[in-house]
Amino acid sequence: MNTVNGMAEIEEQALGTNPSQAVAGVTPLINFTGKGKELFWLYLKNMCFTVLTLGIYHFWGKVNIRKYLWENTLVMGEPLEYTGTGKELFISFLIALPCFLAFAFTITYLQMKQPLIILGIFPFAFYLIEVAVYSALRYRLTRTRWRGIRGNMKGSAFAYALRATGYLFLALFSGGILFPWYMSKTTKLRLNDAVIGNRAVQFAGPASTLYKPFFLYLGMVAVMVIAFVSIMGSTTLFNPADPAAIMALLPLLTAAYIAFIFSFIVLIAFFQVTVFRWFADYTNFGKMRFQSTLKTFPYMGMIFKNMLIIVFTLGIGFAWTHVRHLRFVLNSFHFTGDPQLSELLQDTLQAPKHGEGMLEALDVDLAL
């Protein structure tokens, strides 16, 4: 328990550090107020009950986490409310599981008969995942309320999945070069289908914004691969029959590996910050315009600190790192323009009765 109390003290000291400083002409949009210690005990409770119920409590535990995170996320000073239930998630899982198992057994049987059949199954598998993702987003939006107003998705999960799967395979056939384009296309499809009450969300983020960090990442990987191959191919340094030569090479390989990991984390942080700012800068909600004040190096520093917390607490500090990450990212979002809250009314779209069973059956994680 000393570790838990120590983490709480560290968190209290860090609460004064806000990643989003005051910006002229903009108003803070989100304030996350969750505490690592509270989330830790919630995780512990969920884990104990999940073990005791042989995994069945997992669905109710997920709802407990969401309710806590939602109610500690204040949008313009008003908390979000999560109205989903563990029963909805559990029943939807029970409905989807037999269909998934039948699909899996059919694939296994066909593959035994004809191994190449798997090539024809891939597009359908990706299509199912995209359907599951869209359906899960619709469910979560309809179970999220702010000032009594819920969200929804106005499109079709099947129509979205068809287009998204096509975009994905075009990106794959391009050798990955079109991946930012795929991200832009699918994000536009999802966000432009989203509504909050009677007002639609509008997103117009171009792929060009994502290409700089994407090509930096590809370039870094290429440089590290070339460096590694050059080191291993050097006959003056590497002789498989000479243990002494291998030991002499070990420090160089270790340094190269550490440099690769460090560069990878830096570029991942740069890419994530770019995506967060891209997401905010190109999203409108009526007359509201959003922006994020997130910066790469402070965000990278937060990631390194979170890694150290997890390592030195042997994983106990995960709840604190989760809270630190959410606070750092969410508190960076601001807005300008008139929210026109008096004109925001409840939507009239039908809400799904069940939860995210297909997503659970496919073991796809959207986080939260």
Image (tube, rainbow, N blue to C red):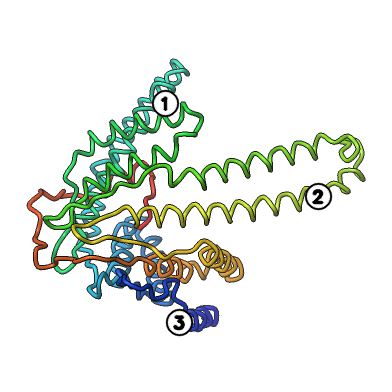
- Amino acid type assigned to the residue bearing label 3 in the image: Gly
Q: Can you give x and y, in whole percent of width and height, for residue 125 in the image?
A: 36, 31
Q: Are marks 2 and 1 in contact (CB under 8 Å)?
A: no
Q: Earlier in the sequence, mark 1 or mark 3?
A: 3
Residue bearing mark 2: 252
The answer to whether 115 is drawn above or below residue 94 in the figure is above
Q: Earlier in the sequence, mark 2 or mark 1?
A: 1
2 sits left or right of 331 in the view: right
266 sits left or right of 116 in the view: right
- Distance, label 2 to label 1, CA atoms, is 45 Å
Instruction: State the SS at label 3.
Output: loop
Closer to the eye: label 3 or 2: 3
Closer to the eye: label 2 or 1: 2
Residue shown at the point (49%, 67%) measured from the top left:
318
Q: Are marks 3 and 2 in contact (CB under 8 Å)?
A: no
- Amino acid type assigned to the residue bearing label 2 in the image: Leu
Closer to the eye: label 1 or 3: 3
- Distance, label 3 to label 2, CA atoms, is 41 Å
The 10 Å Cα crowd at callout 1, few under 14, some 14 to 19, many 20 or more, is some
- Amino acid type assigned to the residue bearing label 1 in the image: Thr
Residue bearing mark 1: 108
Task: Give 362 or 200, whichever is nearer the viewer.
Answer: 200
Quarter placement of the C terminus: bottom left
Please identify the quarter of the rendering in which residue 73 is found: bottom left
Q: Can you give x and y, in whole percent of width and height, for residue 66 in the image?
A: 30, 63
Q: Can you give x and y, in whole percent of width and height, for residue 139 in the image?
A: 22, 51
Q: Name the residue at the top extreme.
A: 114
The 10 Å Cα crowd at callout 3, few under 14, some 14 to 19, many 20 or more, is few
Residue bearing mark 3: 16
